[in-house]
Amino acid sequence: MNTRKTLGIILGIAAISVTILPVARADEADQATRITVSQPIQIPGKVLPAGTYWFVLLDHGDNLNVVEVLDSDRSKVIAIVQTLTAERGEPIDKTVLTLAERPSDEPKALLAWFYPGRTVGHEFVYPKREQKQLAQYKQDSVTVGD
């Protein structure tokens, strides 16, 4: 009887581990990140007003270069944006955004997004003409999050 009880406990713990583990990995895999901006910010094809947004990788198999931008409660898709792989030298434990500093009458443009702890991030793809203009502006990296 003791053996059955012990076996039951072990199987119960194993079942709980199997259930919790995929959930923990899901957030890491899609790199879901909540970002709050206090002023408008441009992404390719759209200007996001001040507010809270979720940036999430869409699952396209091996292609992790499509970012979905969602509203604050993740109920509405704001944009789906193509990205390229971007690299930085050192990982840090917070989200890092690279922005193009534009004239004061224009919103800053989001150039890249790095998930916490990663050296590989996502460079947003702008139309060539706009990309050339953005390259002329000073770029700043800012950390967001707790």
Image: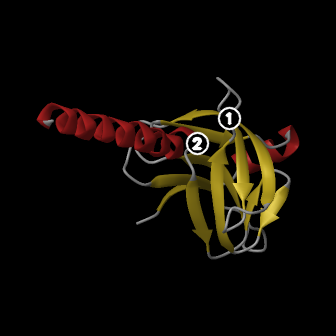
> Viewer-proximal residue, 111 or 75?
75
> Viewer-proximal residue, 67 or 18?
18
- Can the viewer see residue 79? yes
Q: Quadrant of residue 64?
A: top right
- For image coordinates 68% across by 35% down, the residue present is 59
**Compared to 46, does 121 lie above or below?**
above
CA separation in Å, label 2 and label 1: 7 Å
Task: Check disc 2: other Cα within 10 Å, few if <14, some if 14-19, many if 20+.
Answer: some
- For image coordinates 77% across by 45% down, the residue present is 81
Place of residue 75 in the rendered image (x, y in percent of width and height, measured from the top left):
74, 63
Which disc number belongs to residue 82? Answer: none
Place of residue 25 in the rendered image (x, y in percent of width and height, measured from the top left):
47, 40
Kind of residue at disc 1: Asp
Place of residue 142 in the rendered image (x, y in percent of width and height, measured from the top left):
50, 59
The residue labelled by disc 1 is 59
> Viewer-proximal residue, 77 or 104?
77
Q: Is residue 12 left or right of residue 115?
A: left
Kind of residue at disc 2: Asp
Task: Check disc 1: other Cα within 10 Å, few if <14, some if 14-19, many if 20+.
Answer: few
> Viewer-proximal residue, 99 or 24?
24
Q: Quadrant of the C terminus?
A: bottom left
Place of residue 11 in the rendered image (x, y in percent of width and height, measured from the top left):
30, 34
- For image coordinates 18% across by 36% down, the residue present is 6
Q: Is residue 83 left or right of residue 23?
A: right
The residue labelled by disc 2 is 30
- For image coordinates 80% across by 64% down, the residue present is 47
In the rendered structure, are the residues bearing label 2 and label 1 in contact, judged by CB atoms less than 8 Å apart? yes
